[in-house]
Image (cartoon, grey):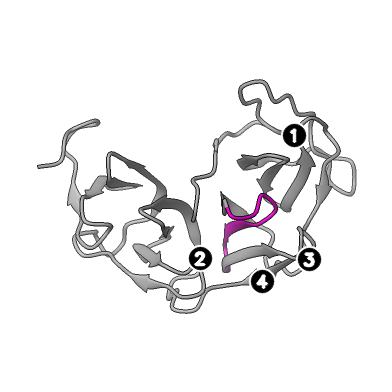
Amino acid sequence: MLKPSLCIYGFILGVLLFQSIHAQDLQSGNGTAVPVVCLAIEAPNKYAGTTTGVYMSAIEKNDWKQINNGLTNTRVFTLQILSDSPTTLVAGTVEGIFVLQNNGTSWEKRSNGLTNPEVRSLAVLNGSLFAGTTSGGVFLSTDKGAGWSRISNGLPGDAVVYSLSQSGGNLYAGTQLGIFASSDDGATWHPVDKLGAALH
């Protein structure tokens, strides 16, 4: 079973604060602060997706270490935790989907069927994993990322899906052309005229 991760986007340097988790600035190899794009938190660990890869730390500590073995591109846009293992998570990058394996020691690329490799966002709904891409629409995986199929009927062909979210059984896609919603697990999409507008 998949479980939604906690992702917070920001433009500050270092790790963003969330609830009671206090994180110090991440440092690159040359000692400069690293811009953090997203966070994923699930006991016992917290993860930070950055422009230089993924960092991991125990929740109660700030002992950040880089975990990039197997990542072919370290520009990470989004993270999603798989609930069957607190040390296994999915990363959406410039070069596709990667899944952290072997107790956090290596990444495995899982982009079979993903015709657009730049993954901007991830979401979970009804046990399936969804990936939003740059000008490629939304893709669906029912096997934890092993295979992907495009589900973008109703989405503009040039839509950049910067964010995905789910609520009440509906899936929402935030794009540069507005918000689109799906009530059938992404099979079809419809524009949402107003923020918070209900699906009919």
Q: Are marks 3 and 4 in contact (CB under 8 Å)?
A: no
Pointer 4: residues within 10 angstroms few (<14), some, or many (20+)? some
Between discs 2 and 4, the one toward the N terminus:
4
Pointer 3: residues within 10 angstroms few (<14), some, or many (20+)? some
- Tell which tag, 1 or 3, sits nearer the viewer: 1
User: Is 166 left or right of 44, judged from the image as shown?
Assistant: left
Above or below, 168 against 185 in this view is above
Range shown magenta:
84-95
- What separation in Å lies between label 2 and label 3 (alpha carbons)? 20 Å
Residue drawn where x is 20% and y is 50% of the image:
183
Return the residue at label 1.
Answer: 59
Quarter of the figure with the C terminus: top left
- List x then y, in percent, for residue 19: 61, 22
Between discs 1 and 2, the one toward the N terminus:
1
- List x then y, in percent, for residue 104: 76, 58
Return the residue at label 3.
Answer: 69
Q: Check residue 144 in the rendering and tell me which mark sits there, or answer none.
A: 2
- What separation in Å lies between label 3 and label 4 (alpha carbons)? 9 Å
Viewer-proximal residue, 32 or 46? 46
Q: Are marks 2 and 3 in contact (CB under 8 Å)?
A: no
- List x then y, in percent, for residue 26: 79, 38
- What separation in Å lies between label 1 and label 3 (alpha carbons)? 22 Å
Kind of residue at badge 1: Ile
Kind of residue at badge 4: Glu
SS at mark 2 in the image: loop
Residue drawn where x is 55% and y is 35% of the image:
8
